[in-house]
Image (cartoon, rainbow, N blue to C red):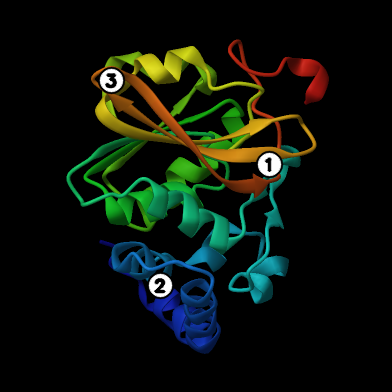
Amino acid sequence: MTQPTEDQTETSDRFAERREALLETLRQSGIHDERVLRAIKSVPREQFVAPFLRAQAFENVALPIEQGQSISQPLMVAAMTQALTLTGTEQVLEVGTGSGYQAAVLAECARSVVSIERWPTLAGRASRLLGTLGYMNVEVHIGDGTLGWPPAAPYDAILVTAAAPVVPEPLLQQLGLYGRLVIPVGSPEQQELLRVVRQEEGFEQRSLGICVFVPLIGAAAWQERFD
């Protein structure tokens, strides 16, 4: 997908051994979708964190970014992406652009990605970086992600990178038939990662396990008091 510059290639070479070790960790932790593993290998995670954190870019840990947000640990990024069962033909909605890293992984696995971010600073920075890295199939918009992005609906898959008290109804309505939605749902302190599939007769839901994400702020989720 991407065409790295000479500087990026040099950086990638410096992290090659750590990247391979991370991929092995992901495989041992249940990530078996080769499309997802190739995406994790291809996306230069070190470009999405502050320079002083780049030495930790390929450790399986979440890292802080601006506005009190974070870039999720690679295992969670991989697990959520794998749960969407992408084949490369889908249009995906991402709620919560953050650094842009998850959007880049999705862009490697799907046809196109629409990403919404409530913080203009984060949206602008992620959009510029994604463009620089060659991800022309990602659109970043500023807005309330709990309301989705109706102009591009319906979506084949929706991924939410922050935790809601319930699955936001606008996202369910923008999910196409047989579309998959992956979202953390629960209290601000702890959530269940849910996979929701739209069937002809309604929505089918199952839990993928316990997780902890920052709260999803918006009209159809948490209010500002949790921000």
Which comes before the other along the chain, label 3 or label 1? 3
Instruction: Tell me the residue that label 2 is attached to.
Output: 41
Residue 148 higher or lower than 212, as above or below: above
Q: Please say if the residues under marks 3 and 1 sit with CB atoms less than 8 Å apart.
A: no
Mark number displayed over residue 113: none
Q: Please say if the residues under marks 3 and 2 sit with CB atoms less than 8 Å apart.
A: no
Q: Residue furthest top?
A: 219
Instruction: Tell me the residue that label 1 is attached to.
Output: 213
Question: What kind of residue is marked 1?
Answer: Phe
Specify few, some or many for label 3: CA neighbours under 10 Å numbering under 14, 14-19, or 20 or more: some
Percent position of residue 225, x then y: 82, 17
Q: Write down the quadrant of residue 176 in the picture.
A: top left
Instruction: Tell me the residue that label 3 is attached to.
Output: 153
Instruction: Tell me the quadrant of the picture where the C terminus can be found.
Output: top right
Percent position of residue 29, x then y: 54, 70
Specify few, some or many for label 2: CA neighbours under 10 Å numbering under 14, 14-19, or 20 or more: some
Q: How far apart in space, not on screen, are marks 3 and 1 (Cα)?
A: 25 Å
Percent position of residue 177, x then y: 23, 24
Element type at marker 3?
loop
Q: Which residue is drawn at 63% across and 39% down?
A: 192
Element type at marker 1?
loop
Which comes before the other along the chain, label 2 or label 1? 2
Q: Which residue is drawn at 53% across and 82% down?
A: 15
Percent position of residue 139, x then y: 35, 35
Quick one: 154 or 7, which is closer to the camera?
Answer: 154
Question: What kind of residue is marked 3?
Answer: Ala
Residue 167 higher or lower than 15, as above or below: above
Q: How far apart in space, not on screen, are marks 2 and 1 (Cα)?
A: 24 Å
Question: What kind of residue is marked 2?
Answer: Lys
Q: Which residue is drawn at 28% across and 25% down?
A: 199
Q: How far apart in space, not on screen, are marks 3 and 2 (Cα)?
A: 30 Å
